[in-house]
Image (cartoon, grey):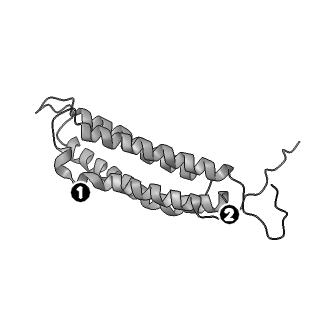
Amino acid sequence: MQRPSAPARATGTSRQICPILVLGWAGIGAAGWSWAGLGSPLPDGYHPVPSWVSPAAYLGSFALLALWGIVPIVLLPAGLDYVRVAGPRNGRWRGAWVGLVVAGIMLEVLPFAVPLAFLGSAPNWNEFAESLGFAAVGTVMIVVLLAARRSPGPVRPGAPLVS
């Protein structure tokens, strides 16, 4: 017995890729800045791994941070395409998405723009605020994606208006 096929969806960004990107970006941002706000749990001079592992770890963490910094650039067109396919033709959801991606980029740039605010003793409350910013922007991004998907689709020309 064959299962009935799901209705065809218009071409565009996958339904899963945008929320996964948003959750990954915001989750890593919130967790990373929370951990940074607590400071290093290891005493100075203590190295739990051999010295040859440290350069590889730094290189790997730099690569991961570079990829994490690129995610908002990928989120902008992916989210705009997702909202275009899912939502109505007015620019409400597209404008909200662009604003949220710009807010996310500003969160990533903030420590480089004002570095002295992030240099301090543990716990560093500026880093906790950065963590909350990532959690808030990520949450609102998910809300916008869900709201755009649930909003009525575009009105076809000649279709009767229902009030």
Question: Tag 1, which secondary structure?
Answer: helix
Q: What residue type is labelled 1?
A: Ala
Which of labels 1 and 2 is toward the front?
1
* Image position, residue 126 (x, y; %): 25, 41
Residue furthest right as drawn: 1
* Image position, residue 104 (x, y; %): 40, 53
Confirm or deny contact between disc 1 and disc 2 (CB under 8 A).
no
Can I make out residue 163 in this image?
Answer: yes
- N-term mark: 1 or 2: 2
Q: Which amino acid does label 2 sit on?
A: Thr
Residue 97 as seen in the image, left or right of residue 151: left
Packing grade of label 2 (10 A; few <14, some 14-19, many >=20) is few
Packing grade of label 1 (10 A; few <14, some 14-19, many >=20) is few
Image quarter of the C terminus: bottom right
Question: Which residue bears the numbered disc 2?
Answer: 11
Quarter of the image holding residue 52?
top left
Residue furthest front as drawn: 163
- For the point 43% across and 48% down, the residue is 25
> What is the distance, in whole Å, between disc 1 and disc 2 at their CAs?
39 Å
- For the point 52% across and 57% down, the residue is 96
Quarter of the image holding residue 39?
top left
Residue furthest left as drawn: 45
* Image position, residue 75 (x, y; %): 48, 57
- For the point 42% across and 41% down, the residue is 135
Residue 83 as seen in the image, left or right of residue 10: left
- For the point 23% across and 42% down, the residue is 53
Question: Tag 2, which secondary structure?
Answer: loop
Residue 136 as seen in the image, left or right of residue 90: left
Q: Which numbered circle lies on residue 113?
A: 1
- Compared to residue 24, the image places residue 66 above or below, namely below
How many numbered marks, from 0 up? 2
